Amino acid sequence: MPTKEVIVLQDLLGTNKKIAAEIRTELEKRGILAVNLMSSPGAGKTTLLEQIVVRLKAEFHMAVIEGDIETERDAERIRAKGVPAWQITTGGACHLEAKMIGRILPAVDPGLDFLFIENVGNLVCPASYELGEHLRCVLLSTPEGDDKPKKYPKAFITSDVLVLTKADLLPYLPFDIDKVVREALDLNPKLRVFVTSAVTGQGLDELISHFRRSREELRGRHA
Amino acid sequence: MPTKEVIVLQDLLGTNKKIAAEIRTELEKRGILAVNLMSSPGAGKTTLLEQIVVRLKAEFHMAVIEGDIETERDAERIRAKGVPAWQITTGGACHLEAKMIGRILPAVDPGLDFLFIENVGNLVCPASYELGEHLRCVLLSTPEGDDKPKKYPKAFITSDVLVLTKADLLPYLPFDIDKVVREALDLNPKLRVFVTSAVTGQGLDELISHFRRSREELRGRHA
Protein backbone atom coordinates (compact mmCIF):
# COMPACT_ATOMS: atom_id res chain seq x y z
CA MET A 1 0.00 0.00 0.00
CA PRO A 2 1.41 3.41 -0.82
CA THR A 3 2.33 5.53 2.20
CA LYS A 4 0.70 8.89 2.98
CA GLU A 5 3.85 10.60 1.67
CA VAL A 6 3.68 8.71 -1.64
CA ILE A 7 0.00 9.60 -2.15
CA VAL A 8 0.61 13.31 -1.48
CA LEU A 9 3.61 13.28 -3.83
CA GLN A 10 1.59 11.59 -6.59
CA ASP A 11 -1.17 14.24 -6.21
CA LEU A 12 1.45 16.98 -6.37
CA LEU A 13 3.12 15.57 -9.48
CA GLY A 14 -0.22 14.99 -11.22
CA THR A 15 -1.34 18.57 -10.58
CA ASN A 16 2.06 19.88 -11.69
CA LYS A 17 1.91 17.92 -14.95
CA LYS A 18 -1.54 19.35 -15.72
CA ILE A 19 -0.43 22.95 -15.10
CA ALA A 20 2.72 22.34 -17.16
CA ALA A 21 0.64 21.09 -20.11
CA GLU A 22 -1.51 24.25 -19.96
CA ILE A 23 1.59 26.46 -19.93
CA ARG A 24 3.13 24.55 -22.84
CA THR A 25 -0.05 24.98 -24.92
CA GLU A 26 -0.30 28.68 -24.08
CA LEU A 27 3.35 29.30 -25.06
CA GLU A 28 2.94 27.32 -28.28
CA LYS A 29 -0.05 29.44 -29.29
CA ARG A 30 2.18 32.50 -28.99
CA GLY A 31 5.04 30.77 -30.84
CA ILE A 32 7.35 30.94 -27.82
CA LEU A 33 9.86 28.12 -27.37
CA ALA A 34 10.47 27.41 -23.68
CA VAL A 35 13.75 25.86 -22.56
CA ASN A 36 14.25 24.41 -19.05
CA LEU A 37 17.90 24.27 -17.90
CA MET A 38 18.72 21.80 -15.11
CA SER A 39 22.00 20.89 -13.42
CA SER A 40 23.94 20.63 -10.18
CA PRO A 41 24.85 23.91 -8.47
CA GLY A 42 27.77 25.53 -10.23
CA ALA A 43 27.61 23.59 -13.50
CA GLY A 44 27.37 26.90 -15.32
CA LYS A 45 23.67 27.45 -16.10
CA THR A 46 23.72 31.23 -15.64
CA THR A 47 27.01 31.63 -17.47
CA LEU A 48 25.67 29.58 -20.39
CA LEU A 49 22.49 31.70 -20.44
CA GLU A 50 24.56 34.90 -20.48
CA GLN A 51 26.38 33.59 -23.56
CA ILE A 52 23.16 32.49 -25.25
CA VAL A 53 21.22 35.72 -24.77
CA VAL A 54 24.13 37.85 -25.94
CA ARG A 55 24.32 35.80 -29.15
CA LEU A 56 20.54 35.75 -29.79
CA LYS A 57 19.35 39.16 -28.67
CA ALA A 58 20.08 41.11 -31.88
CA GLU A 59 17.73 38.85 -33.79
CA PHE A 60 15.18 37.51 -31.27
CA HIS A 61 13.00 38.60 -28.36
CA MET A 62 13.57 36.59 -25.24
CA ALA A 63 13.15 36.54 -21.47
CA VAL A 64 14.61 34.50 -18.65
CA ILE A 65 13.06 33.09 -15.47
CA GLU A 66 15.65 32.36 -12.81
CA GLY A 67 14.98 29.85 -10.04
CA ASP A 68 17.01 30.01 -6.85
CA ILE A 69 16.54 29.16 -3.22
CA GLU A 70 17.80 32.57 -2.16
CA THR A 71 19.24 35.76 -3.77
CA GLU A 72 18.43 37.78 -6.89
CA ARG A 73 21.99 37.40 -8.19
CA ASP A 74 21.26 35.36 -11.29
CA ALA A 75 18.42 37.55 -12.56
CA GLU A 76 20.66 40.59 -12.09
CA ARG A 77 23.37 38.94 -14.21
CA ILE A 78 20.87 38.38 -17.05
CA ARG A 79 19.41 41.90 -16.81
CA ALA A 80 22.95 43.25 -17.07
CA LYS A 81 23.00 41.71 -20.56
CA GLY A 82 19.93 43.75 -21.51
CA VAL A 83 17.39 40.92 -21.35
CA PRO A 84 14.32 40.89 -19.07
CA ALA A 85 14.59 38.42 -16.21
CA TRP A 86 12.33 37.34 -13.34
CA GLN A 87 13.76 35.81 -10.21
CA ILE A 88 11.80 33.12 -8.38
CA THR A 89 13.27 32.56 -4.93
CA THR A 90 11.83 29.32 -3.63
CA GLY A 91 12.74 29.99 0.01
CA GLY A 92 14.07 26.49 0.60
CA ALA A 93 12.31 24.46 -2.08
CA CYS A 94 14.75 22.41 -4.13
CA HIS A 95 13.11 22.73 -7.58
CA LEU A 96 10.78 24.90 -9.63
CA GLU A 97 7.17 23.83 -10.16
CA ALA A 98 4.85 24.67 -13.04
CA LYS A 99 2.58 26.81 -10.86
CA MET A 100 5.53 29.14 -10.12
CA ILE A 101 6.00 29.65 -13.87
CA GLY A 102 2.23 30.08 -14.31
CA ARG A 103 2.24 33.01 -11.88
CA ILE A 104 4.83 34.86 -13.98
CA LEU A 105 3.34 34.06 -17.39
CA PRO A 106 0.80 36.95 -17.49
CA ALA A 107 3.72 39.39 -17.16
CA VAL A 108 5.70 37.82 -20.02
CA ASP A 109 5.73 39.70 -23.33
CA PRO A 110 3.44 37.68 -25.69
CA GLY A 111 5.73 38.58 -28.59
CA LEU A 112 8.73 36.61 -27.30
CA ASP A 113 10.61 34.07 -29.38
CA PHE A 114 12.31 32.25 -26.50
CA LEU A 115 11.62 31.82 -22.80
CA PHE A 116 14.57 30.36 -20.91
CA ILE A 117 13.97 28.92 -17.44
CA GLU A 118 16.95 28.26 -15.17
CA ASN A 119 15.98 25.72 -12.54
CA VAL A 120 17.29 25.53 -8.97
CA GLY A 121 20.77 23.97 -8.88
CA ASN A 122 19.95 20.33 -8.18
CA LEU A 123 20.56 17.32 -10.40
CA VAL A 124 17.80 15.27 -8.71
CA CYS A 125 14.43 16.83 -7.85
CA PRO A 126 13.89 19.23 -10.81
CA ALA A 127 13.81 16.21 -13.15
CA SER A 128 10.41 15.21 -11.69
CA TYR A 129 8.69 18.54 -12.42
CA GLU A 130 7.73 19.61 -15.93
CA LEU A 131 7.48 23.38 -16.24
CA GLY A 132 5.75 23.59 -19.62
CA GLU A 133 9.06 23.54 -21.48
CA HIS A 134 9.51 22.35 -25.07
CA LEU A 135 13.17 21.55 -24.62
CA ARG A 136 14.69 20.24 -21.43
CA CYS A 137 18.46 20.68 -21.19
CA VAL A 138 20.63 19.02 -18.58
CA LEU A 139 24.09 20.53 -18.06
CA LEU A 140 27.02 18.50 -16.76
CA SER A 141 30.28 20.30 -16.05
CA THR A 142 33.57 18.50 -16.56
CA PRO A 143 34.75 18.98 -12.92
CA GLU A 144 31.70 17.05 -11.67
CA GLY A 145 33.16 13.84 -13.06
CA ASP A 146 32.30 11.41 -15.82
CA ASP A 147 30.29 9.01 -13.63
CA LYS A 148 27.26 11.27 -13.22
CA PRO A 149 24.74 10.09 -15.86
CA LYS A 150 24.46 6.61 -14.31
CA LYS A 151 24.39 7.99 -10.77
CA TYR A 152 21.71 10.63 -11.45
CA PRO A 153 19.84 8.99 -14.33
CA LYS A 154 16.47 10.74 -14.25
CA ALA A 155 17.81 14.15 -15.31
CA PHE A 156 19.44 12.50 -18.33
CA ILE A 157 16.52 10.21 -19.17
CA THR A 158 13.99 13.06 -19.20
CA SER A 159 16.08 15.61 -21.11
CA ASP A 160 16.23 16.42 -24.82
CA VAL A 161 19.67 18.01 -24.75
CA LEU A 162 22.87 17.32 -22.79
CA VAL A 163 25.24 20.28 -22.58
CA LEU A 164 28.71 19.36 -21.34
CA THR A 165 30.12 22.60 -19.89
CA LYS A 166 33.59 23.83 -18.88
CA ALA A 167 35.32 21.88 -21.66
CA ASP A 168 38.23 24.35 -21.27
CA LEU A 169 39.11 22.57 -17.99
CA LEU A 170 39.55 19.17 -19.67
CA PRO A 171 43.39 19.38 -19.70
CA TYR A 172 43.39 19.55 -15.89
CA LEU A 173 40.79 16.89 -15.13
CA PRO A 174 40.28 13.15 -15.45
CA PHE A 175 37.08 13.26 -17.53
CA ASP A 176 36.34 10.82 -20.32
CA ILE A 177 33.95 12.53 -22.74
CA ASP A 178 33.40 9.39 -24.83
CA LYS A 179 32.38 7.46 -21.71
CA VAL A 180 29.93 10.19 -20.57
CA VAL A 181 28.32 10.44 -24.00
CA ARG A 182 28.07 6.66 -24.30
CA GLU A 183 26.53 6.25 -20.84
CA ALA A 184 24.14 9.17 -21.37
CA LEU A 185 22.99 7.77 -24.72
CA ASP A 186 22.57 4.33 -23.13
CA LEU A 187 20.06 5.97 -20.77
CA ASN A 188 18.42 8.09 -23.46
CA PRO A 189 19.27 7.46 -27.14
CA LYS A 190 17.40 10.62 -28.23
CA LEU A 191 19.66 12.97 -26.26
CA ARG A 192 21.43 15.62 -28.38
CA VAL A 193 24.90 16.27 -26.95
CA PHE A 194 26.87 19.54 -27.16
CA VAL A 195 30.40 19.95 -25.76
CA THR A 196 30.80 23.60 -24.74
CA SER A 197 32.96 26.16 -23.00
CA ALA A 198 31.76 29.62 -22.05
CA VAL A 199 35.43 30.65 -21.81
CA THR A 200 36.51 29.67 -25.35
CA GLY A 201 33.05 29.73 -26.96
CA GLN A 202 33.37 26.08 -28.04
CA GLY A 203 30.06 24.50 -29.04
CA LEU A 204 27.87 27.55 -28.34
CA ASP A 205 26.98 28.28 -31.97
CA GLU A 206 25.94 24.66 -32.48
CA LEU A 207 23.77 24.70 -29.35
CA ILE A 208 22.14 27.98 -30.36
CA SER A 209 21.46 26.64 -33.86
CA HIS A 210 19.63 23.75 -32.22
CA PHE A 211 17.45 26.18 -30.24
CA ARG A 212 16.70 28.16 -33.41
CA ARG A 213 15.75 25.02 -35.34
CA SER A 214 13.55 23.84 -32.45
CA ARG A 215 11.73 27.17 -32.45
CA GLU A 216 11.20 27.01 -36.23
CA GLU A 217 9.77 23.51 -35.86
CA LEU A 218 7.45 24.71 -33.10
CA ARG A 219 6.20 27.59 -35.26
CA GLY A 220 5.87 25.23 -38.24
CA ARG A 221 3.65 22.88 -36.22
CA HIS A 222 1.37 25.78 -35.24
CA ALA A 223 1.45 27.77 -38.48
CA MET B 1 -3.30 27.25 7.14
CA PRO B 2 -0.56 24.78 6.27
CA THR B 3 -1.21 22.71 3.16
CA LYS B 4 -1.53 18.92 3.16
CA GLU B 5 2.00 18.73 1.71
CA VAL B 6 3.44 20.88 4.51
CA ILE B 7 1.79 18.78 7.23
CA VAL B 8 3.09 15.52 5.75
CA LEU B 9 6.58 17.02 5.44
CA GLN B 10 6.53 18.21 9.05
CA ASP B 11 5.52 14.71 10.23
CA LEU B 12 8.31 13.22 8.16
CA LEU B 13 10.96 15.62 9.49
CA GLY B 14 9.79 15.16 13.09
CA THR B 15 9.99 11.37 12.82
CA ASN B 16 13.37 11.62 11.12
CA LYS B 17 14.76 13.84 13.89
CA LYS B 18 13.63 11.37 16.55
CA ILE B 19 15.26 8.40 14.78
CA ALA B 20 18.43 10.46 14.23
CA ALA B 21 18.63 11.28 17.96
CA GLU B 22 18.35 7.56 18.81
CA ILE B 23 21.13 6.70 16.34
CA ARG B 24 23.36 9.47 17.71
CA THR B 25 22.91 8.19 21.29
CA GLU B 26 23.57 4.60 20.26
CA LEU B 27 26.77 5.56 18.41
CA GLU B 28 27.95 7.71 21.32
CA LYS B 29 27.53 4.79 23.74
CA ARG B 30 29.87 2.81 21.52
CA GLY B 31 32.31 5.74 21.20
CA ILE B 32 31.78 5.99 17.44
CA LEU B 33 32.02 9.45 15.85
CA ALA B 34 29.63 9.75 12.90
CA VAL B 35 30.38 12.22 10.11
CA ASN B 36 27.79 13.19 7.46
CA LEU B 37 29.28 14.50 4.20
CA MET B 38 27.00 16.64 2.03
CA SER B 39 27.58 18.45 -1.28
CA SER B 40 26.52 18.91 -4.87
CA PRO B 41 27.17 16.00 -7.22
CA GLY B 42 30.82 15.88 -8.18
CA ALA B 43 32.21 18.10 -5.40
CA GLY B 44 34.53 15.26 -4.44
CA LYS B 45 32.92 13.49 -1.48
CA THR B 46 34.05 9.98 -2.42
CA THR B 47 37.53 11.14 -3.40
CA LEU B 48 37.88 12.96 -0.07
CA LEU B 49 36.70 9.84 1.77
CA GLU B 50 39.23 7.70 -0.08
CA GLN B 51 41.98 10.05 1.09
CA ILE B 52 40.66 10.12 4.66
CA VAL B 53 40.32 6.36 5.13
CA VAL B 54 43.75 5.69 3.67
CA ARG B 55 45.28 8.13 6.18
CA LEU B 56 43.29 6.84 9.21
CA LYS B 57 43.06 3.12 8.66
CA ALA B 58 46.43 2.09 10.19
CA GLU B 59 45.35 3.57 13.51
CA PHE B 60 41.55 3.43 13.62
CA HIS B 61 38.60 1.19 12.80
CA MET B 62 36.08 2.75 10.50
CA ALA B 63 33.26 2.07 8.07
CA VAL B 64 31.52 4.04 5.37
CA ILE B 65 27.86 4.26 4.36
CA GLU B 66 27.43 5.48 0.80
CA GLY B 67 24.19 7.10 -0.36
CA ASP B 68 23.39 7.22 -4.06
CA ILE B 69 20.32 7.25 -6.23
CA GLU B 70 21.67 4.43 -8.36
CA THR B 71 24.87 2.31 -8.67
CA GLU B 72 27.24 0.65 -6.18
CA ARG B 73 30.23 2.53 -7.58
CA ASP B 74 31.09 4.62 -4.54
CA ALA B 75 30.98 1.74 -2.05
CA GLU B 76 33.21 -0.27 -4.38
CA ARG B 77 35.76 2.58 -4.42
CA ILE B 78 35.88 2.61 -0.60
CA ARG B 79 36.10 -1.20 -0.33
CA ALA B 80 39.04 -1.07 -2.75
CA LYS B 81 40.86 0.89 -0.03
CA GLY B 82 40.32 -1.99 2.43
CA VAL B 83 37.52 -0.38 4.44
CA PRO B 84 34.01 -1.85 4.87
CA ALA B 85 31.33 0.07 3.01
CA TRP B 86 27.56 -0.22 2.64
CA GLN B 87 25.77 1.21 -0.35
CA ILE B 88 22.29 2.65 0.10
CA THR B 89 20.66 3.17 -3.29
CA THR B 90 17.66 5.40 -2.75
CA GLY B 91 16.04 4.56 -6.10
CA GLY B 92 15.17 8.16 -6.87
CA ALA B 93 15.11 9.80 -3.44
CA CYS B 94 17.27 12.91 -3.29
CA HIS B 95 18.66 12.53 0.25
CA LEU B 96 19.40 9.99 2.95
CA GLU B 97 17.07 9.69 5.94
CA ALA B 98 17.86 8.50 9.46
CA LYS B 99 15.74 5.35 9.08
CA MET B 100 18.00 4.22 6.20
CA ILE B 101 21.02 4.50 8.51
CA GLY B 102 19.07 2.77 11.30
CA ARG B 103 18.54 -0.28 9.10
CA ILE B 104 22.30 -0.68 8.56
CA LEU B 105 23.36 0.02 12.14
CA PRO B 106 22.90 -3.54 13.49
CA ALA B 107 25.44 -4.74 10.89
CA VAL B 108 28.04 -2.12 11.85
CA ASP B 109 31.00 -3.32 13.93
CA PRO B 110 30.41 -1.95 17.48
CA GLY B 111 34.16 -1.48 17.90
CA LEU B 112 34.44 1.23 15.25
CA ASP B 113 36.07 4.59 15.87
CA PHE B 114 34.54 6.45 12.93
CA LEU B 115 31.42 6.02 10.80
CA PHE B 116 31.47 8.17 7.66
CA ILE B 117 28.20 8.71 5.80
CA GLU B 118 28.32 10.08 2.27
CA ASN B 119 24.98 11.65 1.41
CA VAL B 120 23.32 11.75 -2.03
CA GLY B 121 24.90 14.48 -4.17
CA ASN B 122 22.54 17.39 -3.57
CA LEU B 123 23.28 20.71 -1.90
CA VAL B 124 19.63 21.28 -0.96
CA CYS B 125 17.49 18.46 0.46
CA PRO B 126 20.04 16.52 2.59
CA ALA B 127 20.44 19.62 4.80
CA SER B 128 16.93 19.03 6.20
CA TYR B 129 17.57 15.46 7.36
CA GLU B 130 19.75 14.66 10.38
CA LEU B 131 21.20 11.16 10.18
CA GLY B 132 22.48 10.85 13.75
CA GLU B 133 25.82 12.42 12.86
CA HIS B 134 28.07 14.24 15.34
CA LEU B 135 29.79 16.27 12.65
CA ARG B 136 28.10 17.54 9.52
CA CYS B 137 30.51 18.51 6.74
CA VAL B 138 29.50 20.44 3.65
CA LEU B 139 31.90 20.27 0.70
CA LEU B 140 32.13 23.03 -1.88
CA SER B 141 34.40 22.49 -4.88
CA THR B 142 36.14 25.46 -6.45
CA PRO B 143 34.63 24.91 -9.94
CA GLU B 144 31.12 25.33 -8.48
CA GLY B 145 31.80 29.02 -7.96
CA ASP B 146 32.19 31.34 -5.01
CA ASP B 147 28.52 32.44 -4.87
CA LYS B 148 27.18 29.17 -3.49
CA PRO B 149 26.92 29.73 0.32
CA LYS B 150 24.39 32.55 -0.07
CA LYS B 151 22.47 30.72 -2.80
CA TYR B 152 22.23 27.42 -0.90
CA PRO B 153 22.37 28.67 2.68
CA LYS B 154 20.83 25.79 4.65
CA ALA B 155 23.67 23.34 3.98
CA PHE B 156 26.13 25.92 5.29
CA ILE B 157 23.98 27.04 8.24
CA THR B 158 23.47 23.50 9.53
CA SER B 159 27.05 22.24 9.08
CA ASP B 160 29.95 22.14 11.53
CA VAL B 161 32.69 21.96 8.91
CA LEU B 162 33.13 23.49 5.43
CA VAL B 163 35.60 21.64 3.23
CA LEU B 164 36.62 23.59 0.14
CA THR B 165 37.75 20.94 -2.35
CA LYS B 166 39.73 20.95 -5.62
CA ALA B 167 41.98 23.81 -4.47
CA ASP B 168 44.48 22.59 -7.12
CA LEU B 169 42.15 24.04 -9.80
CA LEU B 170 42.30 27.58 -8.36
CA PRO B 171 44.85 28.81 -10.95
CA TYR B 172 42.33 28.07 -13.72
CA LEU B 173 39.16 29.43 -12.11
CA PRO B 174 37.64 32.70 -10.95
CA PHE B 175 37.07 31.70 -7.31
CA ASP B 176 37.58 34.11 -4.42
CA ILE B 177 38.33 31.99 -1.33
CA ASP B 178 38.22 34.98 1.03
CA LYS B 179 34.75 35.88 -0.22
CA VAL B 180 33.45 32.31 0.19
CA VAL B 181 34.83 32.00 3.70
CA ARG B 182 33.45 35.42 4.67
CA GLU B 183 29.99 34.68 3.28
CA ALA B 184 29.91 31.19 4.83
CA LEU B 185 30.93 32.56 8.25
CA ASP B 186 28.30 35.30 7.92
CA LEU B 187 25.73 32.51 7.66
CA ASN B 188 27.30 30.35 10.38
CA PRO B 189 30.09 31.82 12.54
CA LYS B 190 30.84 28.39 14.12
CA LEU B 191 31.81 26.78 10.80
CA ARG B 192 35.36 25.35 10.71
CA VAL B 193 36.83 25.84 7.23
CA PHE B 194 39.45 23.64 5.53
CA VAL B 195 40.89 24.35 2.09
CA THR B 196 41.83 21.02 0.53
CA SER B 197 42.99 19.22 -2.58
CA ALA B 198 42.87 15.47 -2.99
CA VAL B 199 45.42 15.86 -5.82
CA THR B 200 48.13 17.71 -3.85
CA GLY B 201 47.07 16.60 -0.35
CA GLN B 202 46.63 20.21 0.77
CA GLY B 203 44.63 20.59 3.98
CA LEU B 204 43.88 16.89 4.48
CA ASP B 205 46.05 16.42 7.60
CA GLU B 206 44.38 19.44 9.23
CA LEU B 207 40.91 18.10 8.42
CA ILE B 208 41.77 14.65 9.74
CA SER B 209 43.22 16.16 12.94
CA HIS B 210 39.85 17.85 13.42
CA PHE B 211 38.05 14.50 13.08
CA ARG B 212 40.45 12.91 15.59
CA ARG B 213 39.97 15.71 18.11
CA SER B 214 36.20 15.53 17.69
CA ARG B 215 36.28 11.80 18.42
CA GLU B 216 38.45 12.33 21.53
CA GLU B 217 35.98 14.94 22.78
CA LEU B 218 33.08 12.55 22.15
CA ARG B 219 34.82 9.79 24.10
CA GLY B 220 35.76 12.29 26.86
CA ARG B 221 32.09 13.26 27.26
CA HIS B 222 31.05 9.61 27.63
CA ALA B 223 34.05 8.31 29.61
Image (spheres, coloured by chain):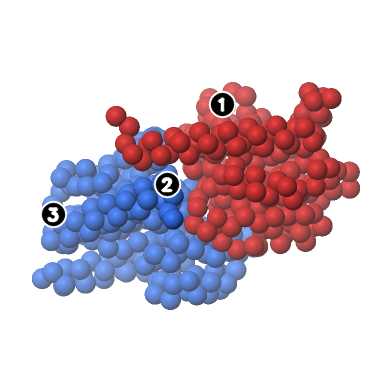
Chain colours: A blue, B red
Horizontally, residue A106 falls left or right of residue B144, namely: left
The amino acid type found where label 3 is placed reads Gly
For mark 1, what is the residue? B188
Which label belongs to residue A5?
2
Horizontally, residue B21 falls left or right of residue B209, namely: left
Disc 3 to disc 2, C-alpha distance: 41 Å
Q: Is residue A160 visible?
A: yes
Say which quadrant the C terminus of chain A sits in: bottom left
The amino acid type found where label 1 is placed reads Asn
The local crowd at label 2, few if under 14, some if 14 to 19, many if 20 or more residues have their Cα within 10 Å, is few
Disc 1 to disc 3, C-alpha distance: 45 Å
Q: Residue at 15%, 49% (x, y): give it.
A: A109
Disc 2: which chain? A
Q: Give percent across and percent down for residue A153.
A: 49, 63
Q: Which of pointers 3 and 2 indicates the residue nearer the eye? A: 2
Q: Earlier in the sequence, mark 3 or mark 2?
A: 2
The local crowd at label 3, few if under 14, some if 14 to 19, many if 20 or more residues have their Cα within 10 Å, is few
Q: Quadrant of residue B70?
A: bottom right
Which residue is situated farthest in the left direction here?
A223
On screen, residue B150 above or below B109: above
Which label belongs to residue A121?
none
B9 or A99, nearer to the observer: B9
Q: Residue at 53%, 74% (x, y): give it.
A: A182
